[in-house]
Image: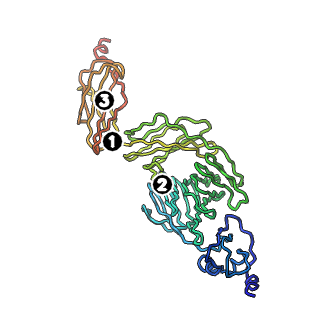
């Protein structure tokens, strides 16, 4: 009688898609009443589970029986992300209200994160996944949930403009979901490293897989395209993804292990089928605390205002399709110790001046050679504290000169030189004879 009444009141169930259900295996001591009271939303009670369980006795659930429960029935808790780091101009907003960014701040569902030029945000999710939001991007955190019944995560992040890079902690249960949406695409992952971007002007999304596997589809699309490592795809409003092999990581030509000039400089080795190059500088090898990025059509980079320290640079190439390729990283040391020189003729001789940027104690060395940069050394002044030197009665001829700097800061000495500069002096006696 009880069973008949229960079966009459149980709703007819449609078959939800695999991604919209959570699979739960019945354990010893489980009852329909306990499961419904502890884990189902108020609108769903034990009668809702009865049809899923396919059992005769509602008071006893067979141990090991698998229940495919619609996600919409299940209770969850929200687990906010944390703002691990940020640089530059960053805007956080909840419901249109601006929130001041601060390292360690909680970032909950509904938060919009926007970055200006040369600005970065890194979010650390509750499952230790990392989300890096580069420059000129706008991202909305939609869902950061953990299903109470199974402990699985259910994350959704929307890329409304720009790019997003993420390293996902492998999902420990099949029912876990980690999804990145754009207005025209959905990327679902299971433990991977990948990038997603969306160009609002062309209405085109791109997904690039660096490690693991992702599934790319149009939102709500019936089929998904599997993308393995080193492959990517673009997807426009037409809904047909275009898959291609990602470009290999370009090399840097002779990257300097010590960068002392006003700007940090790199040159990428040219790759075929490349329209642009990108470098990213970070304070850590995992590229969580990003400092600066730059794009270049010819692979030549000069990045100003880079702080001192042991840093890392990552370089990648961008294909004609717009997909960013694989990347490789180099470490380098940044110690600002720049030096620049000028020369002017005066009534009392030739006045050489120098200046530059850096800290600590700075001492200079001046050298002058005849005919070639490697020619006979005519002047070699060392340990100069002043920033100028006058040379008188220089005979006519061709000279090369340069200024060296020894900078002592934080107990460390750094040396740098200007490039040799040419100075041509006309013999005044010959001019008069002519």
Which dot, 2 or 1, sits closer to the camera? Answer: 2
Which percent across, then down, holds residue 355? 31, 37
Whether residue 305 is visible, yes or no, is no
What separation in Å lies between label 2 and label 1 (alpha carbons)?
26 Å
Q: Which residue is mark 3?
A: 344
Nearest the viewer among 90 and 325 is 325
Q: Residue at x 51, y 57 (%)?
A: 130
Along the line of sight, the residue nearer the viewer: 277 or 70? 70
The percent position of residue 361, horizontal first and vertical second, equals: 26, 41
* 1 and 3 marks in contact (CB < 8 Å): no
Q: Which quadrant holds the N terminus?
A: bottom right
**SS state under label 1:** loop
User: On the image, numbered disc 1 is attached to which residue?
Assistant: 357
Crowding near the residue tagged with mark 1, few <14, some 14–19, many ≥20 C-alpha atoms within 10 Å? few
Badge 2: residue crowd in 10 Å (few <14, some 14–19, many ≥20) = many
Earlier in the chain: of badge 1 and badge 3, it is 3
Location of the C terminus by quadrant is top left
Q: From where the camera sits, is residue 321 visible?
A: yes
Which type of secondary structure does the marked residue at label 2 adopt? strand
Secondary structure beneath disc 3? strand
Q: Residue at x 55, y 67 (%)?
A: 110
Mark 2 vs mark 1: which is more N-terminal? 2
**What percent of the width, then of the height, locates residue 310?**
39, 45
Q: Residue at x 55, y 66 (%)?
A: 144
Residue hosting label 2? 120
Find residue 318 and report its image quarter.
top right
């Amino acid at each position: 009688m009880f069973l008949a009444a229960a079966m009459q009141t149980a709703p007819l169930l449609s078959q939800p898609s695999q991604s919209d259900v959570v699979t739960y295996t019945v354990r010893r001591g489980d009852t329909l009443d306990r499961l419904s009271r502890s884990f189902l939303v108020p609108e769903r009670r034990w009668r809702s589970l009865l049809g899923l369980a396919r059992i005769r006795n509602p008071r006893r659930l067979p141990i090991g029986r698998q229940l495919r429960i619609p996600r919409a029935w299940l209770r969850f808790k929200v687990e906010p992300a944390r703002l691990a780091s940020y640089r530059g101009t960053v805007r956080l907003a909840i419901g249109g209200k601006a929130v001041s960014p601060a390292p360690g701040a909680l970032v909950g569902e509904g938060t919009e994160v926007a970055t200006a030029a040369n600005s970065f945000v890194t979010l650390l999710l509750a499952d230790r996944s990392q989300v890096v939001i580069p420059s000129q991007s706008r991202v909305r955190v939609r869902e950061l949930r953990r299903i109470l019944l199974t402990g699985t995560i259910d994350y959704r992040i929307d890329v409304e403009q720009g790019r997003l890079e993420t390293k996902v902690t492998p999902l420990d249960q099949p029912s876990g979901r980690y999804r990145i949406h754009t207005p025209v695409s959905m990327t679902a992952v299971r433990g991977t490293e990948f990038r997603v971007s969306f160009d609002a002007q062309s209405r085109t999304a791109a997904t690039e897989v660096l490690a693991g596997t992702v599934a790319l589809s149009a939102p709500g699309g019936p089929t998904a395209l599997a993308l393995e490592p080193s492959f990517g795809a673009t997807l426009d409003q037409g809904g047909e993804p275009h898959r291609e092999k990602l470009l290999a990581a370009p090399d840097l030509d002779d990257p300097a292990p010590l960068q002392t000039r006003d700007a940090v400089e790199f040159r990428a080795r040219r790759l075929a089928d490349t329209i642009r190059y990108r470098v990213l500088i970070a304070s850590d090898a995992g590229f969580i605390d990003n400092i600066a990025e730059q794009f270049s059509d010819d692979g030549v980079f000069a990045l100003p205002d880079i702080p001192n320290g042991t840093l890392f640079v990552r370089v990648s190439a961008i294909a004609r399709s717009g997909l960013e390729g694989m990347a490789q990283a180099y470490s380098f040391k940044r110690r600002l110790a720049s030096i620049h020189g000028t020369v002017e003729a005066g009534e009392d001789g030739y006045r050489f001046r120098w200046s530059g940027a850096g800290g600590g104690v700075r001492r200079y060395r001046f050298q002058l050679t005849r005919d070639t940069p490697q020619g006979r050394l005519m002047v070699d002044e060392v340990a100069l504290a002043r920033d100028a030197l006058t040379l008188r009665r220089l005979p006519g001829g061709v000279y090369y000169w340069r200024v060296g700097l020894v900078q002592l800061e934080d107990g460390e000495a750094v040396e740098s030189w200007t490039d040799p500069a040419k100075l041509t002096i006309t013999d005044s006696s010959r001019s008069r004879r002519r």
